[in-house]
């Protein structure tokens, strides 16, 4: 017979300890251990359960025929692009993002588009009343959509309601951290409650063919709150990113069992809600007028979509003996230090007595190493006060030896640049040109310095 055993579960990381402690030994968070009672079977009973009483499961080979999953177009092309081409019936998606970033607005718009096509959509809000959700829908111009609303926190009540008739095509739960399952003791938001609630909802979605979308809260460092196993239970994890002070929003797939994780959907927050941005480069490029020192244009690549962004650099000379500051926004500060070291060691440029500030315009975040050459061009231009030509784009990876290395998808980057009116590109040696844009090839950073300084 099962014996009750007391254990303590960390609400931050999900680790289990045998006794209460003020600080979690794994994540070092304070006052996060909560008592939980679990049934532990004896070794003999566990062995007996494993040896018998189960059912025979069918086994299939890798050569068995398999069909691609069917997809439902949501009516919002940027949303479909991010999730791999459309919503898969019976799938479970987890959408995370900062408070007020627009998660509920986006999913309400997706639900309204599906409802207009005659599909049944249920939106369950545990944080707002149904009247509040309805008022937001009216403000967004979605009042005529036949989305069914409910305000509930009990998973049992939700599944009982949905089990009576035809299962909906889309079920939105806003949010999973506020759901409560009566099968588990504990308050909503605890690790055990989030795990149990998500498990019941995902099982319903798989059995009834309903596409499930769970909205998740995030912690102060941007990760989805709750147990890490929550991300393993769902098929797709989406991150809705952006700064509330900026207009743009980016929907990025962090995990996708039915597609790639290299595509993004770009939206702009307008008064009437989130609008699609088919050409994101217009959000991140300033109006090109007279050339300004310290700026360069970089064609970033998000999946198969090139996005042109402006990289801005500023250097300020300090008095002798002062400690210079290095600051980067939208770019890895460690990689900035590496680029500065290469320029000092390989090109003889002195940044030791200058403060250096680097910014990616529009709040965009770059992780592409192909931005190295554009960052170096902006830094050289800022220090020498010689502008990079405004009709020029720059990309390439910089090695510690000062060599400029090739990067992937150079043709896509050049085609997008030519489409937006750029006439020249500074690229690594070996990159093939495209019609409408001239190339200047660089084998090392020293030649880039000579180009900007006019040597």
Image: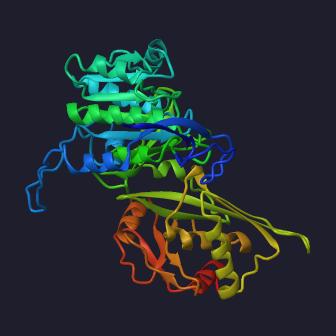
| Rendered position, 396 above or below 191 | below
| Rendered position, 129 above or below 283 | above
Image position, residue 364 (x, y; %): 55, 53
Q: In this orientation, does residue 82 appear?
A: yes
Image position, residue 431 (x, y; %): 39, 78
Residue at image x 43%, y 37%? Answer: 3
Quarter-of-image position of residue 449: bottom right
**Residue 51 vs residue 94: left or right?**
left
Image position, residue 85 (x, y; %): 27, 46
Residue at image x 53%, y 27%? Answer: 187
Quarter-of-image position of residue 238: top left
Q: In this orientation, does residue 265 appear?
A: no
Image position, residue 162 (x, y; %): 27, 20
Q: Quadrant of the N terminus?
A: top left
Q: Nearer the viewer, residue 424 or 400?
A: 400
Quarter-of-image position of residue 211: top left
Q: Quadrant of the C terminus?
A: bottom right
**Residue 434 vs residue 310: left or right?**
left
Residue at image x 72%, y 74%? Answer: 384
| Rendered position, 344 above or below 372 | below
């Amino acid at each position: 017979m099962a014996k009750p055993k007391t254990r303590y579960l960390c609400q931050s990381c999900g680790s289990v300890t045998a006794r209460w402690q003020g600080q979690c030994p794994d994540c070092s968070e304070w006052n996060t251990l909560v008592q939980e009672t679990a049934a532990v079977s004896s070794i003999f009973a566990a062995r007996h359960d494993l040896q018998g009483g189960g059912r025979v499961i069918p086994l299939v080979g890798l050569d068995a025929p398999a069909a691609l999953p069917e997809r439902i177009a949501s009516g919002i092309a940027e949303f479909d692009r991010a999730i791999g081409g459309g919503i898969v019936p019976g799938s479970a998606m987890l959408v995370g993002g900062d408070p007020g970033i627009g998660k509920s607005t986006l999913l309400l718009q997706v639900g309204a588009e599906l409802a207009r096509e005659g599909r049944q959509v249920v939106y369950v809000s545990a944080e707002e009343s149904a009247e509040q959700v309805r008022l937001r829908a009216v403000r967004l111009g979605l009042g005529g959509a036949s989305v069914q609303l409910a305000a509930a926190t009990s998973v049992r009540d939700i599944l009982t309601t949905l089990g009576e008739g035809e299962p909906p095509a889309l079920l939105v739960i806003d949010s999973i951290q506020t759901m409560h399952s009566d099968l588990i003791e504990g308050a909503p938001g605890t690790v055990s409650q989030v795990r149990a609630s998500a498990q019941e909802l995902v099982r319903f979605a798989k059995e009834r063919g309903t596409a499930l979308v769970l909205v998740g809260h995030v912690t102060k460092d941007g990760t989805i709150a709750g147990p890490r196993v929550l991300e393993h239970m769902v098929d797709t994890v989406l991150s809705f990113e952006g700064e509330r002070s900026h207009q743009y929003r980016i929907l990025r797939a962090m995990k996708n069992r039915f597609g790639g994780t290299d595509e993004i959907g770009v939206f702009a927050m307008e008064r009437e809600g989130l609008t699609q941005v088919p050409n994101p480069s217009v959000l991140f490029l300033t109006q090109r007028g007279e050339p300004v020192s310290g700026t360069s244009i970089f064609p970033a690549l998000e999946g198969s979509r090139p996005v042109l962004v402006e990289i801005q650099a500023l250097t300020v000379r300090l008095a002798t003996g002062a400690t210079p500051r290095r600051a980067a926004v939208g770019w890895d500060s460690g990689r900035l230090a590496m680029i500065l070291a290469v320029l000092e060691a390989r090109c003889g440029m002195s940044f030791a007595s200058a403060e250096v500030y680097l910014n990616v315009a529009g709040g965009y975040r770059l992780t592409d190493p192909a931005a190295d050459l554009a960052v170096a061009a902006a830094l050289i231009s800022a220090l020498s006060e010689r502008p990079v030509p405004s009709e020029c784009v720059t990309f390439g990876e910089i090695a510690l030896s000062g060599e400029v290395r090739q990067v992937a998808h150079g043709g896509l980057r050049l085609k997008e640049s030519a489409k937006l009116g750029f006439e020249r590109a500074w690229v690594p040696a070996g990159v093939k040109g495209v019609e409408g844009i001239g190339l200047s090839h660089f084998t090392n950073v020293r030649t880039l310095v000579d180009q900007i300084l006019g040597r």
